[in-house]
């Protein structure tokens, strides 16, 4: 090896070699990062920084990531989930805060940062700036618009109160309600300041809004109340979660947070703001005594109105009655007509009686005994002329007997059993008369009826060489009935002619 390579030359050496007496061995990147981390954490184990929040974001895990900056420098920061849950406000960009924690390094990115344990607003100015910023944001969304406000019920039956159960506020509200108009009160106990107060208040408001009836009646009105205090004490009612719950409440709601001069964002979102919790109770219900007095007054007014109406109706009736005709005037024409009809009735009866007497006189003149006797004599003479003649009766009976004899002989000639007396037979098959050879052959078995009985016979083929002649009819046609003599058809004379 050339002597010139023996000299130490860091810029030209190719391989690293350890030299005797060298007390600076090489370190790994992780070792150096660990040394830096321990050095920074030991030296800056507890620091308080004042700066403006920038790049704030909340991870899904609940950790907070942000940067604290001033005019010349920026320092990254992280706040773990446990510390974030203890925050009394929601961090936002542009808010000046004082962060307490420790410095550490993040080897993965070769940067240092502050791990924040506690974070507070840097003075009342920063708090008000945060308040105004949140107010502008919510107002831009329309949460404070007047058209969202709901009217308060005139006389609520049930009132829900969201407040601390141990403070003087609930006692003031109950006392005031009892004095004005007793009603049912449902108290939802919550924390009104400190860690977790905002979540409890928002949960209570949404809980009242979700009640649908049943064992727990649905409130007609909700009061969110708290006594006076500093802006830090009232900050829970400025939290966005509370303001949105109040704005979304489906029940009319009154905000009574603080005293006369205290104002929170909850007041803007509520349907009505009360300067004090006692004033909220006064807004919620009317005075019972005043209601009773009003009812009495309205009852008196209604009575006076009824009496006045009856009096006016009576006066109008009397005026109408004076204009109407009297009963005598209304009945005068009918009375006059009745008198006329009465006079006409008497005259009519008199004339009718005279006519009846004249008719009776005429009839009495016609009823004379001589006329009756003459009429009876004429009737007797007509009866004597009417005498019975037996010869006419005998002739009529003879004619009727002759006609009956002819009809009897004709009926006898039509008797189907009469030819049987002369040696003929009647052929029957299945209850029917057989009138041809074909019918007899089709039947096969026939009944022959004679004058003294009936026998069965079988029908075979016709005999050879024998002439088949049609059988004569069982009965001869009826002989015509001879006409009666002209002399016998002479009608009988009238006995009374």
Image: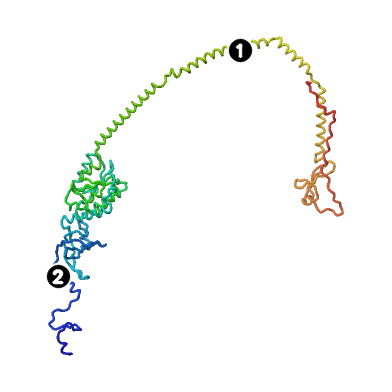
356 vs 397, left or right, is left
Q: Please name the residue that numbered disc 2 is placed on.
A: 39
Closer-to-camera residue (445/78): 78
Give percent across and percent down for residue 259.
18, 47
Residue 151 lies, with reference to residue 392, above or below; the image says below
Give percent across and percent down for residue 427.
80, 46
**Residue at 39% across, 23% down:** 320
Closer-to-camera residue (232/437): 232
- Of badges 1 and 2, the one in the foreground is 1
The C terminus - image quarter: top right
Q: Secondary structure at mark 2?
A: helix
Q: Please name the residue that numbered disc 1 is placed on.
A: 355
Give percent across and percent down for residue 422.
85, 41
244 vs 8, left or right, is right
> Does any portion of residue 246 appear in the rendered image?
no
Q: Are marks 1 and 2 in contact (CB under 8 Å)?
A: no
> Does any portion of residue 481 appear in the rendered image?
yes
Mark 1 or 2 closer to N-term?
2
Residue 228 lies, with reference to residue 314, above or below; the image says below
Q: Give the CA distance from mark 1 to mark 2.
A: 161 Å
Residue 386 lies, with reference to residue 481, above or below; the image says above
Closer-to-camera residue (55/437): 55
Q: Quadrant of residue 413?
A: top right
The N terminus - image quarter: bottom left
Which of the labelled discs sits on residue 483, or is there none? none
């Amino acid at each position: 090896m050339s002597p010139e390579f023996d000299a130490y030359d860091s810029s030209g050496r190719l391989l690293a070699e350890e030299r005797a007496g060298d007390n600076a061995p090489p370190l790994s990147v992780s070792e150096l990062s660990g040394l830096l981390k321990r050095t920074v954490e030991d030296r800056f184990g507890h620091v308080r920084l004042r700066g403006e929040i920038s790049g704030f974001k909340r991870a899904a895990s609940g950790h907070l990531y942000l940067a604290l900056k001033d005019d010349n420098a920026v320092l990254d920061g992280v706040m773990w989930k446990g510390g974030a849950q203890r925050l009394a406000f929601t961090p936002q960009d542009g808010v000046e805060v004082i962060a307490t924690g420790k410095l550490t390094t993040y080897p993965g990115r070769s940067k240092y940062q502050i791990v924040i344990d506690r974070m507070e607003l840097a003075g009342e100015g920063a708090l008000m700036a945060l308040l105004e910023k949140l107010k502008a944001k919510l107002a831009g969304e329309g949460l404070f618009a007047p058209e969202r406000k709901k009217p308060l019920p005139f006389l609520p039956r049930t009132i829900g109160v969201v407040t601390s159960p141990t403070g003087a506020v609930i006692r003031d509200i109950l006392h005031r309600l009892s004095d004005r108009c007793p009603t049912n009160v449902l108290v939802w106990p919550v924390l009104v300041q400190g860690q977790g107060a905002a979540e409890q208040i928002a949960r209570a408001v949404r809980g009242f809004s979700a009640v649908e009836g049943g064992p727990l009646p649905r409130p007609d009105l909700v009061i969110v109340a708290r006594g006076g205090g500093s802006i830090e004490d009232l900050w829970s009612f400025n939290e966005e979660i509370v303001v949105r719950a109040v704005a979304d409440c489906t029940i009319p709601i009154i905000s009574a947070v603080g005293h006369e001069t205290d104002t929170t964002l909850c007041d803007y979102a509520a349907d009505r703001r009360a300067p004090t919790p006692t004033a909220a109770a006064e807004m919620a219900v009317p005075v019972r005594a005043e209601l009773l007095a009003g009812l009495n007054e309205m009852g008196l007014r209604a009575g006076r109105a009824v009496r006045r109406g009856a009096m006016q109706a009576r006066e109008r009736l009397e005026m109408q009655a004076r204009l109407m005709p009297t009963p005598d005037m209304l009945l005068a024409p009918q009375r006059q007509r009745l008198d006329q009809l009465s006079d006409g009735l008497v005259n009519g009866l008199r004339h009718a009686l005279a006519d009846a007497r004249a008719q009776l006189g005429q009839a009495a003149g016609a009823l004379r005994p001589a006329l009756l006797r003459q009429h009876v004599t004429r009737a007797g003479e007509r009866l004597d002329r009417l005498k019975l003649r037996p010869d006419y009766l005998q002739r009529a009976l003879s004619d009727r007997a002759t006609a009956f004899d002819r009809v009897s002989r004709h009926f006898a000639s039509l008797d189907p059993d009469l030819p049987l007396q002369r040696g003929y037979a009647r052929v029957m098959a299945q209850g029917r008369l057989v009138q041809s050879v074909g019918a007899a052959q089709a039947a096969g078995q026939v009944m022959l009826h004679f004058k003294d009985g009936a026998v069965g016979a079988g029908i075979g083929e016709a005999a050879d060489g024998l002439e088949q002649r049609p059988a004569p009819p069982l009965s001869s046609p009826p002989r015509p009935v001879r006409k009666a003599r002209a002399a016998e058809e002479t009608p009988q004379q009238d006995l009374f002619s």
